[in-house]
Amino acid sequence: MTARASKPLPPPTMRERAAAAIAARALRAAIADPSTMVERHVVHADLPRPRRGEWWETWTNLPGFIRVNGRRGYYRHACLPGWTYARAEIVPEMIPDLELLAERGVRPTEATSGQAA
C-alpha cells in the first residue's frame, strides 16, 4: 500500500500573513533580549496515539511559538503547521519562513535537509 500525500494547505489569508509578521518580529526581539519573554506557560499533554506525553511551553508575548519537551526537544509555530525546528534552526530557518509567509504569502516547501516536504 502506498502512502498518500497530505492535502496541500489553502493559500494563507491576510490574517495569517499578519500573524506571521507579528510572530517574526516578536521572535527576533526575544532573541535579541531574552528578558522580554515575559510569562512562560507549561502544559503536559498525554497523547493516546502513539501513547506518549509531551511538555509544551509557550510564552505570553510570543504568539504561536511552542517548545516541545524542553531544551532538548523541538520547536513549532502555529503559523507553520506541519513543520518542526531544532533550536539552532530558529534564526536561520523558522524566522525567515515566517517572514516569507508574511511578505509574500509563501509557505515553506523544503525541509532543512533539502528534501521536499
Image (cartoon, helix red, strand yellow):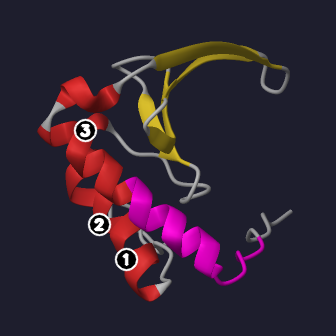
Left or right: residue 49 versus residue 21 is right
- Residue drawn at point x = 50 percent, y = 84 percent: 105
Q: Tell which circle, 3 or 2, labels the residue nearer the N-terminal end.
A: 3
The residue labelled by disc 3 is: 30
Q: Residue furthest left?
A: 32
Left or right: residue 71 versus residue 69 is left
Mark 1 Cα shell of 10 Å, populated few (<14), some (14-19), many (≥20): some
Q: Which mark is residue 96?
A: 2
Which of these two is toward me, 75 or 110? 75
Mark 3 Cα shell of 10 Å, populated few (<14), some (14-19), many (≥20): some
Circle 2 SS class:
helix
Percent coordinates x, y for residue 66 in the rendering: 50, 35
User: Which amino acid type is marked by label 1?
Assistant: Leu
Asked if residue 117 shows in the view, the reply is no
Circle 3 SS class:
helix
- Residue drawn at point x = 78 percent, y = 73 percent: 7
The residue labelled by disc 1 is: 100
- Residue drawn at point x = 45 percent, y = 75 percent: 101
Percent coordinates x, y for residue 108 in the rendering: 46, 72
Asked if residue 23 shows in the view, the reply is yes
Q: Which quarter of the figure has residue 3?
A: bottom right
Q: Which residues are magenta?
A: 7-23
Mark 2 Cα shell of 10 Å, populated few (<14), some (14-19), many (≥20): some
Percent coordinates x, y for residue 61 in the rendering: 43, 37
Contact flag, marks 2 and 1 (Cβ < 8 Å):
yes
User: Which amino acid type is marked by label 3?
Assistant: Ala
